[in-house]
Image (cartoon, rainbow, N blue to C red):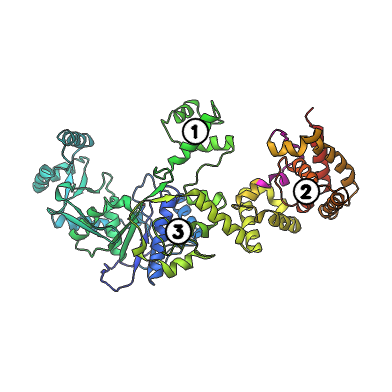
Amino acid sequence: MEFATIPIMSSEPNKKVVTRFAPSPTGFLHVGGARTALFNWAYARANGGEFILRIEDTDKARSTPEATKAIIKDMQWLGLDWDQGPDPDADDPYANQIGDRGPYFQSQRSGLYDDAVKKLFEKGRAYYCFKTAEELDALRKAARAAKKPYQYDPADMLALNADKDALQARLDAGDEHVVRFKMPDHDVAVNDEILGEVVVQQAELEDFIIVKKDGGPTFHLANVVDDAAMGVTLVMRAQEHLNNTPKHVALFEALGLEKPRFAHIPLIFNSDGSKMSKRDKAKVARQAAKDAKLESVDGIDGQLFADFLAKKNDELPVALVIAKQLDLVLPEIDVADFRDSGYLPEVLDNYLSLLGWSPGNDVERFGPNPLSFLKENFTLDRIGKSAAKFDRDKLAKFNTEAVVMLPVDDFAARLKAHLAAHYPEYDDLVANDAHFKAFCEGYQERSRSLDEPAKGGRFFVCSDDEIVYDFTPKGIKKAMMKNDGEGFVMLERLVEAFGDLPEEGFGNAAHDWMAKTAEAESLNMGKIAQPIRVAVSSGTVTPPIDATLNILGKARTLTRFKNCIAVKPA
Ligand code: GLU
């Protein structure tokens, strides 16, 4: 693949806005990253600018092509498109890229970083450093003991670098080393679009590493070189990067590159004030395992499990197995988690954009197409400074509203895709148009997500033997056991009555029978419907009886009636 040489763009006012999302492909796209991507996308789109996707894969050990592909997939799912970056539709995004300032994988741009390092050496702003990790540790400890901020002391290294022969001898001997950037001898100011001016005192500035032991560039170097080379005019990222920005500003200046504008967006916290992270899954799984007094879990090493319980590790595989064993939904963190849980992408777009931004006037719901809304309305001046709270209940509420409002065909198409992706046991039901239509009608208005019909409707697709009856929960006890087991008496009667009904249109015929009988005997319909629900589903909530029995059919309905009667408690 050939790429044009990269022009260094200037960042004058009034020029086209260029933003970028620059994930490190070391794992799935989490909500924080998605929010950053969304804000950058929105700002570019709102200003007729360009949005770049750049993959920051300088950490060779932790970056994977799978993570890159997953990030691309998740961004596509959220509806975020980019003007430059890996081609989202290509099988191999590394080989197929769009835009004239690529490549967009840092692993493919090493020549640029080498040039920048050379330039810094020429300007006396880079030097080799041979200090070992232990030596640095000792220096840090000493600084702590003296209650001083730790500042790397470059004097001896600079002296060594000045002595060309001695330096060359160490390099020739293959002594392990890094390259450090010599920070300026003055304070560094970051003019943040959101936080205002943030000044870091010279005494706090540490000469940081720009070339690692393995010869590769660090995040700082590659990030700055690429933002300049790609003509990025606004760097918008989470506040956790604020510590990095003075380093980046100093690098831009030392390299004689035009600085972009910077905007640091608020962190996202859980409702309890803790930082939202992957560990939240471990936390919930651990508590559930303790509550359920689990002593071991399938396929997980005993020691690993014991350590997990003792908070000595937060291993995700352990959390996942616990969740599976206890039928538990772990808190969603990654975009893929939300997709798997049946959230609609536009709901996530809408909700995520409220984490640190608002359009004003208490507007929170952006209609059926939140991305269009953002394109029209997104501005930097409405981004807040303080941390945002991730309110799961509010997100679930948004999702419920959106699911109910979906046009029927749209709901059916999305549910179909969700079932195909996660629940192959629904294949037959989905393939039967009439049944699937009834299923959708039965569930749309009662679903908080696309996953609820799948979970709630399991009784439609399991075998009759898999239905396990428990008559102790309150609603079931009432429906079946009250007045000397009147629910069972009704079921016995229904076995007879429904046995005479036609197979074709069974659910409708059953419903007619129920309506007539209720009227003739002045019976509440619930007295007939609830025992039916319990018998066919082992629960008290199903879609309307006619739809439910149409899908189940006569034979399965009668078998379940009989199975239920057979386990009547004495
Ligand atoms: N690769 C960095 C990250 O994922 C990018 C930071 C930035 O946006 O500059 O955090």
Q: Residue at x 72, y 40 (%)?
A: 538
What amino acid is at disc 2? Leu
What amino acid is at disc 3? Pro
Ligand 1 closer than 8 Å to the CB at disc 3? no
Ligand 1 closer than 8 Å to the CB at disc 2? no
Image x and y of residue 404, in percent? 61, 58
Q: Residue at x 52, y 38 (%)?
A: 320
Whether tag 2 and tag 3 are in contact, CB under 8 A, the answer is no
Q: Residue at x 34, y 67 (%)?
A: 18
Q: Residues within 10 Å of mark 3 (few under 14, many from 20)?
A: some
**Is residue 469 on the magenta stretch?**
yes
Quickly name the residue at label 2: 552
Image x and y of residue 514, in percent? 84, 50
Q: Secondary structure at mark 3?
A: loop
**Is residue 33 on the magenta stretch?**
no
What amino acid is at disc 1? Gln
For the N terminus, give its image quadrant.
bottom left
Q: Residue at x 70, y 39 (%)?
A: 475
The Cα atoms of the two marked residues, 2 and 3, are separated by 46 Å
Q: Which residues are magenta?
A: 456-472
Image x and y of residue 237, in percent? 34, 56
Q: Earlier in the sequence, mark 1 or mark 2?
A: 1
Quickly name the residue at label 3: 93
Q: Earlier in the sequence, mark 1 or mark 3?
A: 3
Circle nearer the viewer, 2 or 3: 2
Quickly name the residue at label 1: 287
Circle nearer the viewer, 1 or 2: 1
Q: Secondary structure at mark 1?
A: helix
Q: Quadrant of residue 214?
A: top left
Q: Earlier in the sequence, mark 2 or mark 3?
A: 3
Q: Is residue 254 left or right of residue 55?
A: left
